Image: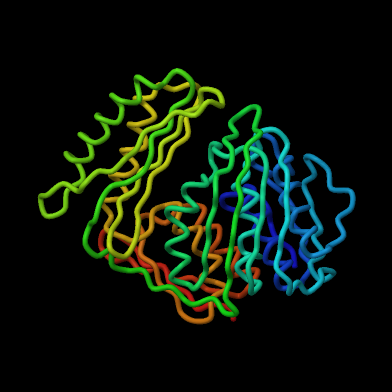
Amino acid sequence: MEIDGGQLEGGGQIIRTCCSIASIKHFDIMIHSIRKNRPKPGLADQHIVCIKSIGEIFGIPLENIRLKQLELLFEGSKGKNVKEPIVKTFKMKGAGSCCLVLQSLLPILISIEGSHQVSIFGGTHALWAPTPEFYNDILSPALKLMGITLNVQLKKYGFFPKGGGEIECLVQSPSSIQPIKLIERGNGIKISGQIVGGKGDDEEIISILQFVKKECRKNIRINGEPLVCEVDGMCHSNGKTKYVELYIEFEQCRISSYCVQENNETFKNLITRTLNKLYEEFEHGGCCDEYLQDQLLIPMALANGHSMISCGKISLHSETMFVLLKQLLGITFNVIPQGSYNIIECSGSK
């Protein structure tokens, strides 16, 4: 099978998805034009770690993979049938994202029945990558509805440029993934999350917490009433990078917004970005935020039955996944507009 690595979103997501699915389904795949429209085309360190991690689990031979290469032949047909629990440790160079490695491994972990444990060293909170908190607080409850138990523990912080962080992922997977139906939010319960500062932010974080709670009470209301706000604040000692995770908990789902500090921006600007995204996700009325919608597409494609989720605007990442999963598995995703939100549906490949 041949895949254009520069189509649509055109990033590492295509590489991770192709190699994961090819290893699960045991077929060969040629990816060309890898990241061709990016400032630095071709494979980067983090992509190579993801590919080699998948290859290690399945015993797939990988030779002559190098930085910046624009083509990759991944021979999934040569992989072994993995039936025993997976216990592995993987290491990124510097602050390469642990969670992007986990993103490449998760389709594999949920596809093999049993209890799995994976430890990953590197960067724990990076730009343009999920966070350990997102996996635990947002993705995990959704996967629970599919019969999958996911627990991601942050063992040690790791930020750009040094990295040095660690996460541990525990997955309990069923013999058959259940389809998900996540359409109605139910009643609002509370606003949760955490605001994390770096060295020297102890005093400022107190006023930031007060500001966040005030803004949430003012802007997030259900039937005219504010929700309880249980956002915590803390500081880490590993540099000065700040990050924020906020989510609204409903009876049936959680809607989130998370941001990592960019280019030494102020705490106030970081908070404002996170809040604005949370307001946007709150307003559309669906059950999945921008990041959860695309993280659920592979589990939906691998499930045994018909799945449906509601979300806001369809992201470019999701559009890319629609095309990829059609090419890789023959799965067709349908998008049904429902006023302010959309419903994504598909019938799984099992």
**At 21% from the left edge and 45% from the top edge, which residue is drawn?**
220
Q: Nearer the viewer, residue 171 or 302?
A: 171
Left or right position of 152 against 306: right
Q: In which quarter of the view is residue 188 placed?
A: bottom left
**At 35% from the left edge and 31% from the top edge, which residue is drawn?**
271
Residue 337: horizontal and vertical position, in percent?
32, 65
Residue 184: horizontal and vertical position, in percent?
28, 67
Residue 215: horizontal and vertical position, in percent?
22, 35
Q: Is residue 241 placed above or below 8 in the rendered structure?
A: above
**Quadrant of the frame with the N terminus:** bottom right
**At 24% from the left edge and 56% from the top edge, which residue is drawn?**
189
Q: In which quarter of the view is residue 40 placed?
A: top right
Q: Nearer the viewer, residue 256 or 330?
A: 256
Q: Residue furthest left?
A: 224
- Coloring scheme of the render? rainbow
Residue 265: horizontal and vertical position, in percent?
44, 22
Q: How many marks?
A: 0
**Quadrant of the frame with the C terminus:** bottom right
Left or right position of 274 against 92: left
**At 55% from the left edge and 49% from the top edge, which residue is drawn?**
153
